[in-house]
Amino acid sequence: MHIGILKETKVPADRRVALTPSSAVTLMNLYPEFDISVESSDIRCYSDAEYKQAGIRVTEDLSDCDLLVGVKEVAPSTLKTGKTYLFFSHTAKKQPYNRKLLKQIVEKQITLVDYEYLIGNDNVRIVAFGRWAGIVGAYNGLRAYGIRNNLFDLKPAHKCYDMKEMTGELKKVTLPPIKILITGGGRVAGGIRESLAPLGCKTVDSLEYLNKIYDEPVICQIEPWDYVKRKDGKDFDLQHFFYYPEEYDSVFFPYSTVTDLLITGHYWDPGSPVFLSEEDYLKPEFKISVIADVSCDIKKPFASTLRPSTIDKPFYGYNPLTGKEGDPFDKENITVMAVDNLPGELPRNASAEFADKLVESVFPAFLNDRDGIVERATIVRDGGLTRNFSYLEDFLAGEK
C-alpha cells in the first residue's frame, strides 16, 4: 500500500502532519508492505528537508498513492477521484460548511475514513488532539490573565519551537490568590492540568472552592455531577446524563461568583443545559474576568463565546451589557480565548504524538482490519454512504 501524506489546504493554514519523518520510517520498518511519499509543503512544521534526510520521498504528485492522509479538511478542488482518504472531515455531524466537501467525495467515488470515528474495542477514540488543545488552551488562558492584569507577558505558544520552550515561559508567572476553574475530565482537561502543573497551585474540591477564601492561587476541576442536577431530584447518573441531557438543570452559576480564570475542557451536548446565559453575566455577583474556552462551542453553553478566534488573534472581549464583541482587555469586557485549532500552536509535539498512535493502532488496520477499526470509521466507500452514516443522506441532498 502506497501512503501519500498530503500538504494541508485548509485556510487558515494548519502546520500539523499525520506522519512525522521518524514515524514514517518506523512504520515502513515495521510493515514493509507500506511505501510512503510526502507532498511538498512550505508551511508544514516538519520541512521537506527533514523528510528527505529520513529517506522519505518528497514529491508534488501523489496520484500513484492508494491512501491519502491529511489532518484537517481537504480542499474539495484537490480531491482525487477513486482514492481513499483519511482526515478529520467534520461532516458526520452535518456541519453545513462542509456539505460541499462531502458531496465532492461522493461524486468522485472516494472512500473517506475519518479519524474522529476510529474507535477501539473499548469504545474509546484511538487518535485525538484533545490533550494538546488543553495544554495550549490553558497556556493561552494564563497569557490572557497576565496581559489583562499587567502581571506578566508570555510568548505566544505558536512562536515557541515546542512545548519545552512554552513551558519555560511559565517561569515568568507569579499569580495572586486567584481561583482557577477547569471543567471536564477527559483528554482536554488532562492537558489543561498538565499545562498548569508547573505553577504548583493548590488543588481544592468543589465545596472548598465555593466556600473558602485563600491567600494563594487555587485550582478546582469540576465534572458533570458538579455542574448539573436532575430535574426529577434523583441522584446523578453519568450514563443517564449522556443519554438524556435535556432532563438536567445547570447548577454552574455559583462557580462564576468565585472564579477569576475559567478554562473549559468539557464535552457539551446541544441538549444539555447551558453553563452561563447572557443574563448570568449581568448579575452583580458574577466575577469571571477571563474565559479560555477550549471547548469552543459557539454562544452555548457560554454566551460569551461569540465566535472562534484565531492563532494570530486569540483574544476578544465580550461586553455583558451589549452582548457584543469589544476590546479584549477593556475592564468592562470579559476576555475570551476561543481558538478552535489550538493543537496547531504546538504542531511538532502534537503531530509526533498523533503519528505514534497512527503507527501503533491505525495503519496496521488498513492491512488487516480484523477488529473493524477502519470499517467503523468509514463514512463513504467508493462514493456511497456506509450503513453507519446513512443518516447523512438528507444532508447530502441539501434538505437539512
Image (spheres, rainbow, N blue to C red):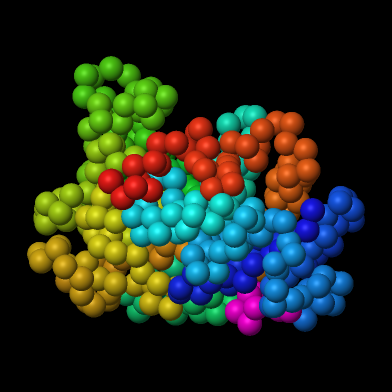
Q: Position of residue 116 (x, y in %)?
A: 54, 46
Q: Is residue 328 above or below residue 184?
A: below
> Magenta span has 86?
no
Which one is in front, 15 or 178? Answer: 15
Q: How many marks?
A: 0
Which one is in front, 227 or 128? Answer: 128
Q: Is residue 95 above or below residue 40?
A: above
Q: Is residue 122 above or below residue 45?
A: above
Q: Is residue 366 visible?
A: yes
Q: Quadrant of residue 132?
A: bottom right
> Magenta span has 46?
yes
Q: Position of residue 91 (x, y in %)?
A: 44, 50
For residue 338, side relative to residue 232 (left or right):
right
Which one is in front, 220 or 158? Answer: 158
Say which residue appears at 28% left-offset and 17% top-offset.
234
Say which residue appears at 34% left-offset and 72% top-offset.
315
Q: Quadrant of residue 217?
A: bottom left
Q: Position of residue 173 (x, y in %)?
A: 49, 71
Give, as a single range, the part of the protein colored magenta.
Answer: 41-48
Q: Position of residue 228 (x, y in %)?
A: 29, 33
Say which residue appears at 45% left-offset and 54% top-offset.
102
Q: Is residue 191 visible?
A: no
Which one is in front, 396 or 199? Answer: 396
